[in-house]
Image (spheres, helix red, strand yellow):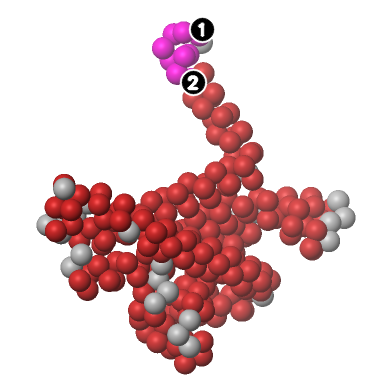
Amino acid sequence: MAGRNCLEANDWICGAYVSSRAQDLVDATVQHVWITVVSVAIGVVVAFPLALVARRWKAVAGPVLGFTTILYTVPSLAMFSLLLPVFGLSAAVVVTGLVLYSLTILVRNIVAGLEAVPEDVKEAARGMGFGQTRQLFQVELPLALPAIMAGLRIATVSTVSLTTIGAIVGYGGLGNLIYEGMSSLFKAQVLTASAICVVLAVAADLLLLGVQRLLTPWTRARGGARRRARRSVARVETGEVAA
């Protein structure tokens, strides 16, 4: 009875809504995750060569970074409207728009990460006979991973949020439920779908953070060394260890 009452009262928090619309929530979440993963994956594939070109030829860096920044400033409604004549009313409209939005973050972070690699490290690699390709993949990219992963995390969280805009063409994942709920003033649907979006964004960020820690164990080692040094200094200052 209480469950029916919360639906009839149009409460923001309603367990009856979750139980009665569980399949709708699952379907919307699956579509949301699928669109996000595909968009970010394609974004990385496109951003990587663009970043390499921008890094290799400085004259091209400005136009590439400027163009990706301009794309990011285009309002999402306008972006999807411009893509509709090309892709029609399909998920490709949303995925393409999200890929274009992700480029400014991904390209900049890849370039920044690669440029932060110390020159003496690159010289040592060349001295050991590393060619450009081998040096890139075995030396520079591993050292640039923290900056690259930071950009990937930001792009992923942004994509989770922006995917909801795809509701205007019927491919917005949880955004479809939010849009329908707002149109009908269905409070429980709006809040539940929005909450799941937040959970997805946090989960994606934590997952990528875990991947980053696995791929960059040396950063944990440096952090551990710094913590041990700070503890040693603290013990000396408090008199636990003779200075």
Give the Cα distance between marks 2 and 1. 14 Å
Q: Which residue is mark 2?
A: 231
Across and down, in percent, residue 33 comes to 48, 61
Seen in the image, is 18 located left or right of residue 184? right
Residue at numbered disc 1: 242
User: Which disc is residue 175 wearing?
Assistant: none
For the question of whether residue 122 can be seen, the reply is no
Looking at the picture, tell me which residue is in the foreground, 75 or 85: 85
> In the rendered image, which quarter is residue 29 located in?
bottom left
Horizontal relation, residue 76 to residue 65: left or right: left
Residue 22 in the image, given as x and y percentages of width and height: 36, 56
Let me know if residue 190 is in the magenta part: no
Return the residue found at the far bottom: 85
Question: Helix or strand or loop: what does disc 1 sit on?
Answer: loop
Quadrant in which residue 173 is drawn = bottom left
For the record, the magenta segment spans 233-242
Q: Check disc 1: other Cα within 10 Å, few if <14, some if 14-19, many if 20+.
A: few
Within-10-Å neighbours for mark 2: few <14, some 14–19, many 20+: few
Specify the amino acid type for callout 2.
Answer: Arg
What amino acid type is highlighted by mark number 1?
Ala
Question: Looking at this view, is 27 or 38 the one in front?
Answer: 27
- Would you identify the image quadrant in which residue 129 lies? bottom right
Percent x, y of residue 74: 39, 80
